[in-house]
Amino acid sequence: MLLSFLKENTDRQFSIEEICEGVNQGGGHDISLSAVYRNIAKLVEDGHVRRFMRDGSRTAVYQYIHCRNCEKHLHMKCVKCSKILHMDDEATETMLVAAMKKNNFKIDERKTMLYGVCDSCSEDI
Amino acid sequence: MLLSFLKENTDRQFSIEEICEGVNQGGGHDISLSAVYRNIAKLVEDGHVRRFMRDGSRTAVYQYIHCRNCEKHLHMKCVKCSKILHMDDEATETMLVAAMKKNNFKIDERKTMLYGVCDSCSEDI
DNA sequence: AATGATTTGCGAATCGTTCGCAAATTGGAA
DNA sequence: TTCCAATTTGCGAACGATTCGCAAATCATT
């Protein structure tokens, strides 16, 4: 099932094609790309899944990731290993949001993705 | 000229088509879409202009904005009026970056865009 | 089993972007 | 100025991820 696949993999984003492969991995009847497109659209609409865009390829590609309580915290994406980190330090989270509000900007955690380099990748020379 | 058009308009992002129109507004010889695509690619490569993606349309659309000292500060985009805000409070800026580093994440100001609601738009009911 | 509603898969359409190539423009060197 | 090579341009075709249309398959309710 589509949603359960994403639920079990929240450490990175998946393209439609990857989701299709991942779901069909489980054996049984294969699902088509079209169906994945349609079903994922519904999941996004209902707020179960979030959609971002990947830059860099010839044309833009949408990527998807499951929402847990993700509207409650910020996310970071490592530009080297593409891993998604969920901000789990509540003190920092509230501090960041407060600092932004002081600058008259009410940050939207659901749409924002912080890009940078994660801990393990910054160790690499 | 393409770069000077973007230099004069740093309060929002422009699509290729908007850039084309904006440049051709200045009279003289019109430049084609192809040329805009090519020239903007070079500007991005050389670090004079930054490229982001706009979500929501049928297919992905790239958008461009001029870099001033933009590698030095964060940017915010209002999801309501699409205006781009440049973080000008240095104290907050360094505080944010430090807070992220405490969470083992070295934020990349050039690739990150904070989404949310700006001051004037949050006043609207 | 029968009926209607939903979902599926396939192929065509969409459309921003990129590519290929010949024509136009530019920039030196003589 | 004139010649020639190098770069840039504009046009149309190609690309490719996504969406659309529609008939066939599946599901749900009785």
Image: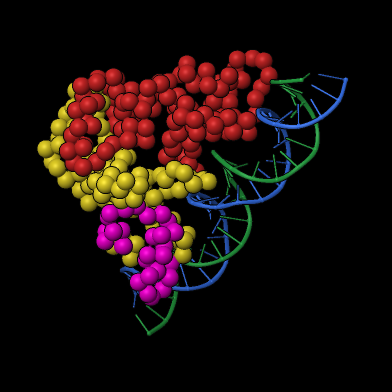
Chain colours: A red, B yellow, C blue, D green
Q: Magenta stretch? A: B5-31
Relative to the observer, which residue lies in front, A56 or A15?
Answer: A15
On screen, residue A18 above or below B27 = above
Spot occupied by residue B7 in the image (x, y as percentages of width and height): 27, 59
Identified at 33% across, 65% down, the residue is B1
Relative to the observer, which residue lies in front, A46 or D7?
Answer: A46
Identified at 22% across, 51% down, the residue is B68
> On the rendered structure, is D18 left or right of C1?
left
Spot occupied by residue A107 in the image (x, y as percentages of width and height): 28, 36
User: Which quadrant holds the N terminus of chain A?
Assistant: top right
User: Which quadrant holds the C terminus of chain A?
Assistant: top left
On screen, residue A96 above or below B2 = above
Identified at 49% across, 21% down, the residue is A6
Which of the 4 image quadrants contains residue A75? top left
Queried whether the magenta region covers residue A38, the answer comes back as no
Spot occupied by residue A104 in the image (x, y as percentages of width and height): 21, 42
The reply to whether residue B45 is in sight is: no
The reply to whether residue A112 is in sight is: yes
Q: Report the number of discs.
A: 0
Q: Residue furthest left?
A: B91
On screen, residue B78 above or below A80 = below
Spot occupied by residue A72 in the image (x, y as percentages of width and height): 33, 25
> On the rendered structure, is C14 left or right of A48?
right
